[in-house]
Amino acid sequence: MYNYSELKEKVEKAVTDLSFNTEAVKLTDPVKYTLSSGGKRLRPVMALMACNLFSDKIDEAILPATGLEIFHNFTLVHDDIMDQAPVRRTSPTVHTRWDINQAILSGDVMAFIANECLLQTPAGYLHKVFTIYNNAAINVCIGQQLDMDYEKRDMITRQEYLRMIELKTAVLLASALKIGAVLGGSDDKDSDLLYEFGRNLGLAFQIQDDMLDIWGDTEVFGKTPGGDIVANKKTFPLVKAMETASGEQLKRLQTQLYLKDADPKTKVEKVMNVYDQLNIKETTEALANKYIEKAFSFLREVGVSEERKKELNLTASSLIGRDR
């Protein structure tokens, strides 16, 4: 069985070994820049771990798994344009370092490079794998559109929020695990169980991320808490608070949301005060834990030994900060 470090090294090598057309370096340089900017390589690694659950031969899964990482990075390039984000992984975003047109075009070509990697899937699995991937890609785009739509609304429901993060964040992780399982030769039952494992894990991760933005340790996460509050970003804590608050609490929340040119520090303090009164941290943590428990319950049902699941268990537990 391979561990996380060994699989990440294989993905890094596959990324490094990619060949690029040199006819238009202004197109390919941003691609190389994006793919060399690091990251956990979580999706391809977990795809390979899912493959390794069922087979010790994973070499034919490496390029398809790498395609998932390239697609993920393509979405980040375009998301950064839409969000007007100046920094990604402590480095300038592509549209900041070059310009918006180059960022759009280099993102576009990354999507097709991802396709090329997925097309290296062994023939017997190609249609199934590419269908899973293509559906995931469409769903990620739907999730991003919902996110943009919700930015224009005063408030959204809990169900709308959960559906949006499922599509935007959780589906690609779920699909990576399912693709890996298919490439490893699993049956439909086990590949579906791994999809549900990844989907629930992705939901838990995003909800935890919402929580850490507000209550995370500055020294650990390297940023001042409350950025989502300052930006009026519709995260689960805000959605839940607006759903729960009434009377004076609701009025105070609405005042901070609609107040222009508010002092960021004061705004964060006032909103967090309402959150504390409504026990939003505890509620958010409970929901994340609910999805975590659901995720691992699906993994336990997968029909391979617990010993073979060990590395996937460890990686997933590390992702959501839980010792298991």
Image: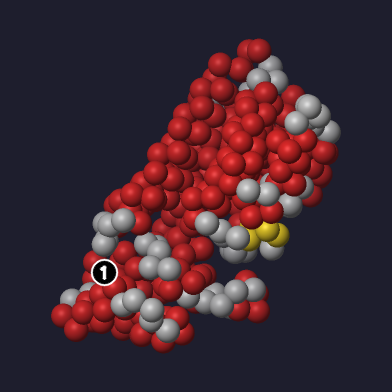
Q: For this rendering, which residue is in front, 53 or 143?
A: 143
Relative to residue 185, is residue 322 depicted above or below?
below
Residue 264 appears left or right of 162 = right
In the rendered image, residue 256, in percent from the top left (x then y), is placed at: 31, 78
Instruction: Identify the residue shown where x is 32% and y is 82%.
Output: 274
Q: For this rendering, which residue is in front, 306 or 198?
A: 198
Query: Is residue 185 something that shows in the picture?
Result: yes
In the rendered image, residue 81, in percent from the top left (x then y), is placed at: 54, 50
Instruction: Identify the residue shown where x is 65% and y is 20%.
Output: 119
Q: For this rendering, which residue is in front, 91 or 116?
A: 91
Q: In this figure, which residue is indicated by the disc labeled 1? A: 242
Instruction: Identify the residue shown where x is 24% and y is 66%.
Output: 243
What colouring style does the render use?
Answer: secondary structure
- Rate crowding at label 1 as few (under 14), some (14 to 19) or many (20 or more) other CA atoms within 10 Å: many
Q: Secondary structure at mark 1?
A: helix
Query: Is residue 309 something that shows in the picture?
Result: no
- Quarter of the picture containing the C terminus is bottom right
Q: Quadrant of residue 107?
A: top right
Q: Quadrant of residue 177?
A: top right
Relative to residue 268, is residue 116 depicted above or below?
above
In the rendered image, residue 281, in percent from the top left (x then y), is placed at: 41, 74
Q: Amino acid at mark 1?
A: Met
In the rendered image, residue 112, in percent from the top left (x then y), is placed at: 62, 27
Residue 3 appears left or right of 225 = right
Relative to residue 280, is residue 68 depicted above or below?
above
